Image (cartoon, rainbow, N blue to C red):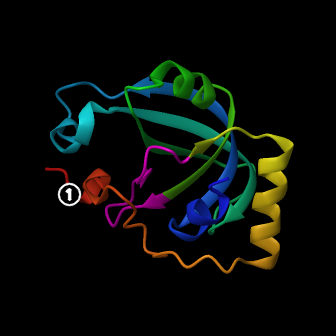
C-alpha cells in the first residue's frame, strides 16, 4: 500500500464522494506542463472523512487531478465514485495532485490504514512539502 508516502508527501488526504468530473480543455496552459501525455481533470468532490490537512468534513472542493494514459478508464471510474486522494495546495490557491498514483479505492483496508496513520503517525520519512515525483504538475508553474 502507498498510504504512508501518499500521506507524508502531500498536504491533504481525504475520502471523497465525487460530485462532478470535467476534462480540462486542451487549450488550457496546464497541458504545456504535463509529462508523458497525462490528462488533467477538474474533480468537484464532497469530503466524507479527512485524514490530513485543515479541511471541513462535509465540505466540497475542486481538485486538479492528473491521470496517466495507461489505465485512464480505470482511474476515471474511480474519480467518478467514492475515492481516497492525497493532494496538495498551490500557492495560487488550487488543489492538485502531484503524482498519478494518488487516487486510491476506498476499500476497508485502505480506509483503516489512513485512519491509523492519521491517529498514530508513521515512521515513513517523506518530503512533506508536496514536491512529489512531478513538481511540474503544480499549477504555480503554469503560465
x 45%, y 76%: residue: 127
Magenta stretch contains residue 94: yes
Residue 29: image location, x then y, percent: 17, 39
Residue 113 falls left or right of residue 65:
right
Q: Which residues are magenta?
A: 88-102
Residue 56: image location, x then y, percent: 69, 59
Q: In the image shown, does 88 or 56 lie closer to the viewer?
A: 88
Q: Is residue 14 above or below residue 28?
A: below
Residue 32 falls left or right of residue 117:
left
Q: Is residue 9 above or below residue 33?
A: below
Q: In the image shown, does 80 or 94 lie closer to the viewer?
A: 80
- Magenta span main SS: loop
Element under disc 1? helix
Residue 8 falls left or right of residue 127:
right
Residue 85: image location, x then y, percent: 60, 48
x 82%, y 67%: residue: 116
x 42%, y 50%: residue: 99
Name the residue tied to disc 1: 141
Q: In the image shown, does 116 or 28 lie closer to the viewer?
A: 116
**Mark 1 crowdedness (10 Å alpha carbons): few <14, some 14-19, many ≥20:** some
Amino acid at each position: 500500500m502507498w498510504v504512508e508516502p501518499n500521506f507524508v508527501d502531500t498536504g491533504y488526504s481525504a475520502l471523497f464522494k465525487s460530485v462532478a468530473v470535467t476534462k480540462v480543455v486542451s487549450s488550457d496552459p496546464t497541458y504545456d506542463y504535463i509529462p508523458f501525455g497525462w490528462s488533467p481533470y477538474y474533480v468537484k468532490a464532497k469530503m466524507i472523512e479527512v485524514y490530513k490537512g485543515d479541511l471541513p468534513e462535509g465540505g466540497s472542493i475542486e481538485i486538479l487531478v492528473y491521470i496517466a494514459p495507461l489505465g485512464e478508464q480505470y482511474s476515471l471510474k474511480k474519480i467518478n465514485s467514492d475515492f481516497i486522494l492525497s493532494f496538495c495546495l498551490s500557492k495560487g490557491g488550487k488543489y492538485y495532485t502531484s503524482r498519478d498514483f494518488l487516487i486510491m479505492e476506498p476499500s476497508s483496508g485502505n480506509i483503516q490504514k489512513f485512519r491509523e496513520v492519521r491517529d498514530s503517525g508513521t515512521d515513513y520519512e517523506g518530503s512533506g512539502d508536496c514536491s512529489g515525483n512531478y513538481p511540474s504538475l503544480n499549477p504555480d508553474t503554469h503560465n
